[in-house]
Amino acid sequence: MHKITILTVLAISLSACDGSDEGTVQTDDGQTVNYDVDRAGGDTKVRVSGEDGEKTVIDSGTNVAADLPDGYSLYPGASVINTTTMSQSDGRGMLVIMQSDATPEEMVTFYRSQAKNAGVEIGMEMNSNGSMMVAGETEDGGTFSFNASSSGDGTTGQLVVGQGLN
């Protein structure tokens, strides 16, 4: 499935214009992977399937709902800039990019608390040049990270939450 995920990211990076694209790619180890990219209204939907029947679906854009896992919520008063969701047979993940008038410290404190309440053991914290990051994992392999950076318009935050994507 790792190869399918890499190809999916590649497919999204190629999605610069409205329209759709589909095709087949041969991986280095000889597997055939089918992909379908649909770019409509500024959002992108990518479907990737492998020979073994595994499927990956990625939705990304300004109109994609930030349907966060239990225990997580958007920062109060923040506006969502972009959401990317990924689902596969063995898990799902989400990236939410948001803008807030809060400080990076306030946003990191908020998400550190939510992560700990969701069972995340914080394994990394960083503070450098106005940017802060906190990250960790749950016992069952769930992942969490939150990055916050000062910008001219307040703070830009990036929340990443993944479940079962090992």
Image (spheres, rainbow, N blue to C red):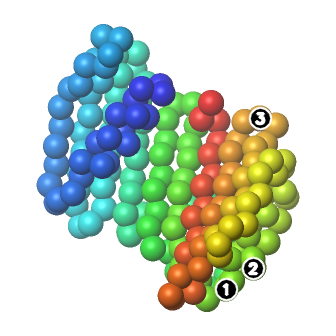
Q: Quadrant of residue 69?
A: bottom right
Q: Amino acid at mark 3?
A: Asp
State the CA–CA distance, disc 2 to disc 3: 28 Å
Residue beneath the point at 29% across and 42% down: 11
> Could you say whether the residue bearing mark 3 is in a helix, strand or loop?
loop
- The span from disc 1 to disc 2 (Cα, nearest Å) is 6 Å
**Residue highlighted by disc 3:** 140
Please say if the residues under marks 1 and 2 sit with CB atoms less than 8 Å apart: yes
The part of the image, by quadrant, that contains residue 148 is bottom right
What residue is at 77 percent from the left and 58 percent from the top?
125
| Residue designated by label 2 | 106
Callout 3 crowding tier (Cα within 10 Å): few <14, some 14–19, many ≥20: few
Front of the two marks 3 and 1:
1
Quarter occupied by the C terminus: top right
User: Is residue 27 at least partly visible in the picture?
Assistant: yes
> Residue drawn 75% across and 77% down?
105
Query: Do labels 2 and 3 touch, CB within 8 Å?
Result: no
Which badge, 2 or 3, is on the more N-terminal residue? 2
Residue 24, x across and y down, in percent: 21, 26
Question: How packed is label 1: few (under 14 Cα within 10 Å), some, or many (20 or more)?
Answer: some
Would you name the residue on which mark 1 appears?
A: 102
